[in-house]
Image (tube, rainbow, N blue to C red):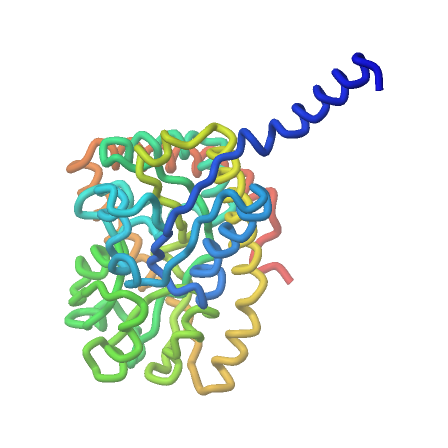
């Protein structure tokens, strides 16, 4: 082989080796708020983790941990903010007391449905606002999952008028809980794993949690027979990968891009899986003696009125909450005609 050919061969070998040399090894434990068995809600981060391993050739390993194994199920924000863990995966809103705006990034009552929320996040300025809101708390949040509307909840008795909510012992999260409180319910916040027993023993008269598929997995149909829809309190339910800012800044741009891109794919997977599976579960519930109800206009009007009051109160107390809510509302209003005119009416047959 001539010197020229040897030089070319060496150069080719060096170029081929560059991607492997540039890729760094990342080993993080990722505590989750939801069990990995919960369809579209808890199994999205494990999917993201597996895809990251493949994309990176095994050098980026975000090992997921079930709720309570590393940190408490509702403690993801605190653990990541303090640097106890590099990252964690959760619904956004459990940190409502410390970051009020987190509640509407997680779910805005009577707000945008999942596809439109995703549009706002990626093309309406939502992601930049998200990063701005969490930067003071030492967290780099990444939109990493979104599911179809949740059910309004399970009730041991029928709910016909707003008066039926007065004194009701009910589990609800984030702004939904504040709205139920405004309507007279006694609201508590419990993680998903404790809800079946609380309903069974009468500690709760009702609970909301998630999609029909997830509610089925948690067994609520065995202890409550009135299932109410629509999920006015969470037209979209959004999950995030919370990353400690120092840990994020240590990563190379290539690794950061791999994580963010895979989370974007996770949004698509969660959205698609959630939408695909709910119809069969509703049929199953009816066979098991569950009564499917749709809240009437009187109930929805009461929830909507209380929701406006709660959002106005939160906006008055927190400038970031107002800034984000104004952005969401402007985006939703700008697209209202398109949604009303561009899609077939839902009651068209």
Is residue 203 placed above or below 183 in the rendered structure? Answer: below
To which quarter of the image does residue 315 belong?
top left
Instruction: Pinpoint residue 78: horizontal percent, then vertical percent.
Output: 22, 47
Instruction: Pinpoint residue 134: horizontal percent, then vertical percent.
Output: 28, 35
Instruction: Pinpoint residue 298: horizontal percent, then vertical percent.
Output: 32, 63
Q: Is residue 336 shown to the viewer in this render?
A: no
Instruction: Pinpoint residue 220: horizontal percent, then vertical percent.
Output: 37, 78
x 48%, y 55%: residue? 44
173 and 289: which is toward the camera: 173
To which quarter of the image does residue 195 belong?
bottom left
x 26%, y 62%: residue? 172
Tell which residue pokes out farthest to the right in this image. 1
Is residue 144 placed above or below 197 in the rendered structure? Answer: above
Is residue 73 placed above or below 312 in the rendered structure? Answer: below
Q: Quadrant of the C terminus?
A: bottom right
Q: Quadrant of the N terminus?
A: top right
x 17%, y 69%: residue? 166
Instruction: Answer left or right for 34 relative to 96.
Output: right
x 21%, y 82%: residue? 202
Q: Is residue 23 shown to the viewer in this render?
A: yes
155 and 276: which is toward the camera: 276
């Amino acid at each position: 082989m001539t010197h020229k050919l040897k030089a070319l061969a060496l150069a080719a070998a060096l170029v081929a080796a560059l991607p492997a040399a540039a890729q760094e090894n990342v080993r993080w434990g990722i505590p989750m708020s939801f069990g990995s068995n919960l369809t579209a809600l808890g199994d999205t981060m494990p999917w993201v983790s597996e895809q990251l391993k493949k994309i990176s050739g095994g050098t980026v390993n975000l090992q997921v941990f079930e709720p309570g194994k590393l940190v408490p199920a509702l403690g993801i924000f605190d653990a990541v903010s303090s640097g106890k863990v590099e990252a964690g995966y959760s619904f956004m809103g459990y940190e409502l007391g410390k970051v009020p705006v987190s509640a509407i990034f997680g779910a805005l009552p009577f707000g945008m449905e999942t596809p439109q929320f995703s549009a706002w996040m990626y093309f309406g300025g939502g992601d930049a606002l998200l990063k701005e809101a969490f930067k003071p708390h030492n967290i780099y949040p990444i939109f990493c999952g979104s599911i179809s509307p949740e059910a309004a909840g399970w009730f041991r008795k029928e709910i016909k008028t707003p008066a039926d909510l007065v004194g009701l012992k009910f589990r609800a999260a984030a702004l939904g809980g504040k709205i139920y409180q405004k309507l007279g319910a006694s609201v508590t916040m419990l993680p998903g794993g404790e809800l079946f027993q609380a309903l069974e023993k009468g500690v709760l008269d009702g609970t909301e949690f998630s999609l029909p598929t997830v509610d089925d997995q948690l067994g609520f149909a065995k202890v409550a027979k009135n299932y109410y829809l629509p999920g006015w309190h969470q037209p979209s339910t959004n999950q995030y990968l919370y990353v400690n800012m120092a840990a994020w800044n240590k990563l190379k741009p290539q690794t950061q891009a791999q994580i963010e891109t895979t989370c974007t794919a996770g949004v698509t997977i969660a959205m698609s899986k959630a939408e695909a599976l709910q119809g069969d579960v509703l049929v199953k519930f009816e066979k098991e003696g569950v009564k499917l109800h749709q809240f009437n206009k009187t109930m929805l009007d009461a929830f909507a009125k209380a929701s406006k009051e709660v959002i106005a109160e939160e906006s008055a107390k927190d400038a970031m909450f107002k800034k984000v809510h104004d952005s969401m509302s402007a985006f939703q209003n700008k697209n209202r005609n398109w949604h009303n005119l561009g899609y077939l009416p839902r009651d068209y047959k």
